[in-house]
């Protein structure tokens, strides 16, 4: 009987000792496997680099200078309305495949919040440090100085093209939304204004009739009682007051004439305003088909300016009433045109680049190294298990 058979505890200790991996075993293992680990690491690095080259997209960047075109509130509103407009364009307009893909890609609020970043005059940290130094700095943290557009693409040209399309859509889309809002306001003003003015004109005519009848009666009284026509001492009074009937008749007649003249002047003003509302309504009726024809606000602004110029030719040059309302329309559209075309400009060209080459290469290298290491360790363990079974 040998020692292992005589002492089972010694045999078990010997088996456990064989299962343990010593430092020498690890050194021997690495010495024999380093070539495989090195080759695997190189292959992993090449695979990581290849993935970065073939599949990782380019990122384009384009910076638009904000020349007072939007403030923080209007920009927050555009972040919600521009995606809806993009979705509407993709569904209703006849677009080619490239344009359709573009509008679908920018039709979510999440895309705008991640890819179009507002840059403020002061950061929150700077605003906190400079708080109280000057009242001019109070609005700086909410003043937008520029907007950074970031877009991705499979190629450099595709990324640059996407940023340019986004910038152009920001101009045409935001201008379209403001022009549409302007025409809607004109339409509402024309509809409600005409009804309100007609009601006021009717009331003024009724009141004028009462005053004319009152003047007629006063003149009859003045003929019947000529001795009571002494003028008053020039005291100002309201002919509608109850005590006015006790004043001299001549004074009441003067006051009644004054009231009639005021009513006639007010009627003329109301009728002129009604004529202006009618001219605005004519403009809206011609502008509405243009609003439904295109989503390009820059083109639309130019068309509306041409429409205003043609409508101006239809009225006589001495018609100051209608000329005035068209002058207001022209001034508003001209201001919009300047803002739309000059409000968002860029002093640089869009750029596109790839980042993360080192990260992907290192990830491939480390990943392949550990995969090969685990495979070699698993192979070594399997060989030891088979060896023990054969013994």
Image (spheres, grey):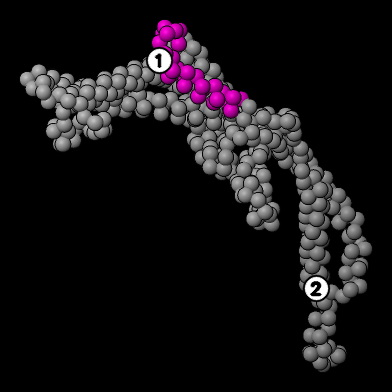
Q: Residue at x 50, y 19 (%)?
A: 330
Which stretch appears magenta?
Answer: 312-341
Pick whichever, 103 or 80, lies toward us: 80
Q: From the viewer's perspective, is 21 left or right of 326?
A: right
Q: Residue at x 78, y 90 (%)?
A: 8
Please give the residue where the numbered disc 2 appears in the rendered image.
388
Pick whichever, 365 or 380, lies toward us: 365
Q: Residue at x 89, y 71 (%)?
A: 25
| Residue 317 within the segment the image draws in magenta | yes
Q: Could you tell me residue 385's position as x and y percent?
A: 78, 70
| Residue 48 within the segment the image draws in magenta | no
In the rendered view of the protein, which quadrant contains the C terminus?
bottom right
Instruction: Give me the disc on residue 322.
Output: 1
Is there any visible trace of residue 337 in the rendered image?
yes
Say which of marks 2 and 1 sits in front: 1
Residue sitting farthest toward the left? 224
Instruction: Give me the disc on residue 39.
Output: none
């Amino acid at each position: 009987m040998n020692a292992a058979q005589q002492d089972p505890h010694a045999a078990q200790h010997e088996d456990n000792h064989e299962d343990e991996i010593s430092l020498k075993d690890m050194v021997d293992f690495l010495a024999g496997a380093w070539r495989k680990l090195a080759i695997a690491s190189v292959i992993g690095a090449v695979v990581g680099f290849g993935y970065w080259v073939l599949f990782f997209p380019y990122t384009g960047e384009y910076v638009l200078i904000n020349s007072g075109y939007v403030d923080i509130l209007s920009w927050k509103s555009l972040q919600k309305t521009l995606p809806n407009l993009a979705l509407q364009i993709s569904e209703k307009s006849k677009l080619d495949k490239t344009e359709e893909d573009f509008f679908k890609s920018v039709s979510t609020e999440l895309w705008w919040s991640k890819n179009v970043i507002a840059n403020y005059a002061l950061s929150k940290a700077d605003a906190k440090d400079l708080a109280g130094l000057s009242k001019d700095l109070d609005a700086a943290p909410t003043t937008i100085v520029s907007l950074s557009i970031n877009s991705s693409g499979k190629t450099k040209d595709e990324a640059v093209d996407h940023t340019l399309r986004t910038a152009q859509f920001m101009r045409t889309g935001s201008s379209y939304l403001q022009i549409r809002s302007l025409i809607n306001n004109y339409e509402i003003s024309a509809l409600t204004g005409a009804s309100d003015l007609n009601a006021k004109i009717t009331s003024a005519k009724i009141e004028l009739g009462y005053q004319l009848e009152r003047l007629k009666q006063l003149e009859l009284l003045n003929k019947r009682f000529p001795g009571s026509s002494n003028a008053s001492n020039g005291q100002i009074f309201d002919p509608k007051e109850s005590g006015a009937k006790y004043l001299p008749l001549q004074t009441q007649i003067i006051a009644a004439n004054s009231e009639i003249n005021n009513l006639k002047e007010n009627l003329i003003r109301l009728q002129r305003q009604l004529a202006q509302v009618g001219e605005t309504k004519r403009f809206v009726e011609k502008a509405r088909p243009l609003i439904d024809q295109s989503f390009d606000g820059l083109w639309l602004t130019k068309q509306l300016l041409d429409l205003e110029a043609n409508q101006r030719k239809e009225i006589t040059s001495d018609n100051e009433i209608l000329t005035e309302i068209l002058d207001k329309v022209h001034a508003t559209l001209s201001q919009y045109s300047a803002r739309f075309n000059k409000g968002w400009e860029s002093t640089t060209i869009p750029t596109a680049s790839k980042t993360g080459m080192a990260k992907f290469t290192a990830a491939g290298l480390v990943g392949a190294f550990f995969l090969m290491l685990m495979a070699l360790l698993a192979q070594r363990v399997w060989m030891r298990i088979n060896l023990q079974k054969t013994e």
